[in-house]
Image (cartoon, rainbow, N blue to C red):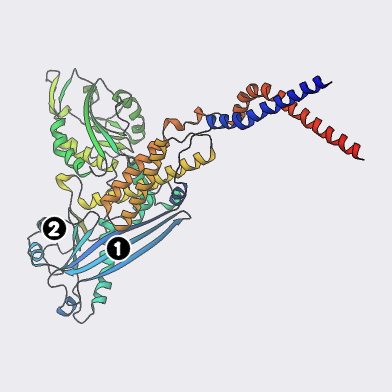
Amino acid sequence: MAAIEIEKQRGRYAALAIAAVVIVLGIPLWWKTTETYRAWLPFSQISELDSLQLQLSVEVEVVFSRGTLSPEQQKKVPLSQTRQQEHQVDAKTALQYRYETKYRTATIMEEDALNQPSAQEADLSLHMLSESACGSVVVYIIPETSTLLPADVKVYVGQRRTALLRAAPFESTAGLKEVLSTLEPQVKQVVDTMSFSHHDILAALSDRIRVGQVSKESLADSMRAIKSSPGYEITFSLLNPDPKSHSLHWDIEGAVNSYIQPLLDKLNPIANLSVDSQILYYAVLGVNPRFDNSVSAYTLNADSLAHVINPVEARLGSNAASSNPVLNFLLYVPDAQHSPLFIRDHSKREVPSNSFHSPRWGGIMVYNVNDMYGPEAEFPVDININMSKVMGVFLAQLRLMLGVQKTQPPPGFVLQSAGSAGVADWELDRLMWSRSVENVATASTTITSLAQLLDQISNIVINDNIAQQVSSAVTSLQAAVAELEAGNLAFALQYSREAILASERAFFDPSLLHLLYFPDDQKFAIYIPLFLPMCVPIVLSLLKIASEIRQRRADKLAKKD
């Protein structure tokens, strides 16, 4: 009996030892080796980004030229005023516009510049004196008797960041406050034209707010322009469906350097743009044009233009070396059997440029060459394409695709064309305001969505690279918001670009793919066949030991009684 008792005692000790090893060593070791590594993320700062509070600050300088203020009024300048506008877009988005206006009189050199014979020369002379900061607006108040502007023009907006405003004569007895209050609505019109407008900012936030809050015009412009990206690929393609009849020659390199490259240089702070070209032979539009006897020409109606792009796009190819969006600009020369070919709008009228564009894709221009040779010409006919005509159309389409919208000025305003630069400085500022706000909104939405995903799925690995990208995106977002508030537009755009790059790298990291992780029920299905056969004997032994201990205690109590 003693030997049997000793054997039972040894069995109990063995079961307890095994259970102790499993509980003390096995379970912690298994837990540590199978736990999901999750680097630290700034969730508190990310949650603050969910509520977007943006303040945009614009520096406005109003300069009074000789003959606009009385001597008494001139004594009270320079001075500064601040005007604010607040807009609560929705529960999570609020906008505040801050206009810091400084009033002063013109210097002697500025007076000499304003004495130029034309407004264009005055604009250039003022630009040579000093270059205004990015995002700022300078308004020169000139007397009503000035010959710089025609009689029916109240405001002239130049190619830079300056405008000339013709003001009616102020009463010499009026105080400066009355003069400024009279000027304020006119200056506000100039600032809204040369800087951002509320509708522009709402269009930039269209992915974050309800569509109904954005005006139809602004929404149409936003949908036409390609989404903000760190870079774009621009491809010019010459389509020659009939190389047996037409031998086409185009100086695309010279045309790009003369017409497109100045615009790309100005847009360099916004995105990196690269250009390439190609010639496609036997490439057709894929839509059969109809012959119109009334004009003895083939026509393409507006309803059929939507079916042109897909067949052509299959021939264009793609740039596999780059992930940037591509803008396509196609020059189509109709074959001899379908010439001339004209595009008609929804009103059945011929489009003057004989071209059309597709939002966020590019544009197509039809170039007729049938009048360049006679019926007795020998084929193939050598044809030199007028690149000035072609690039004028493509440049206008490229501006629309990149978000440089055509501004509708108020009555009495004259906007100087951008000229060879392709875009005026103030147009570039408008685009930079919109892109900065769009980048901030997109990056904040991406980061908050990623944080919600990682919070909901606890077994997704968060490696150090993802944590670094998220932290970089949050830091850049905070810096971009701060620079917008300070009115430093160039730095705000730079930080917003860094934020959107970092946020997208983190969001689309391959290690975050949900298909790489198993749900909990699948984990149990894997672990139970491994651990159950080992755990059952241990648990039964522990239950038996507990039962024996309870029995012994019961026997001792019975003996005492």
Distance Cα–Cα, label 2 vs label 1: 21 Å
Amino acid type for the residue under numbered disc 2 = Ser
Question: Label 1: how many residues lie within 10 Å, few (<14), some (14-19) or many (20+)?
Answer: many
Q: Is residue 280 above or below residue 89?
A: above
Residue under the image location 31 percent in, 43 percent down? 497
Quadrant for the N terminus, please: top right
Q: Position of residue 74 (x, y in %)?
A: 17, 76
Tell which of 80 and 300 is nearer to you. 80
Q: Which mark is residue 331?
A: none
Q: Position of residue 217 (x, y in %)?
A: 36, 50
Q: Earlier in the sequence, mark 2 or mark 1?
A: 1
Residue 540, by quadrant, is top right
Q: Is residue 78 above or below residue 471?
A: below
Left or right relative to 110: residue 303: right
Q: Which mark is residue 99?
A: 1
Residue under the image location 16 percent in, 39 percent down? 259
- Residue 494 appearing in the image: yes
Residue 499, by quadrant, is top left
- Residue 438 appearing in the image: no
Q: Position of residue 98 (x, y in %)?
A: 32, 62
Residue under the image location 45 percent in, 45 percent down? 448
Tell which of 131 and 278 is nearer to you. 131
Q: Position of residue 521 (x, y in %)?
A: 62, 29
Quadrant for the C terminus, please: top right
Q: Secondary structure at mark 1?
A: strand
- Residue that numbered label 2 is attached to: 130
Question: Label 2: how many residues lie within 10 Å, few (<14), some (14-19) or many (20+)?
Answer: few
Amino acid type for the residue under numbered disc 1 = Tyr
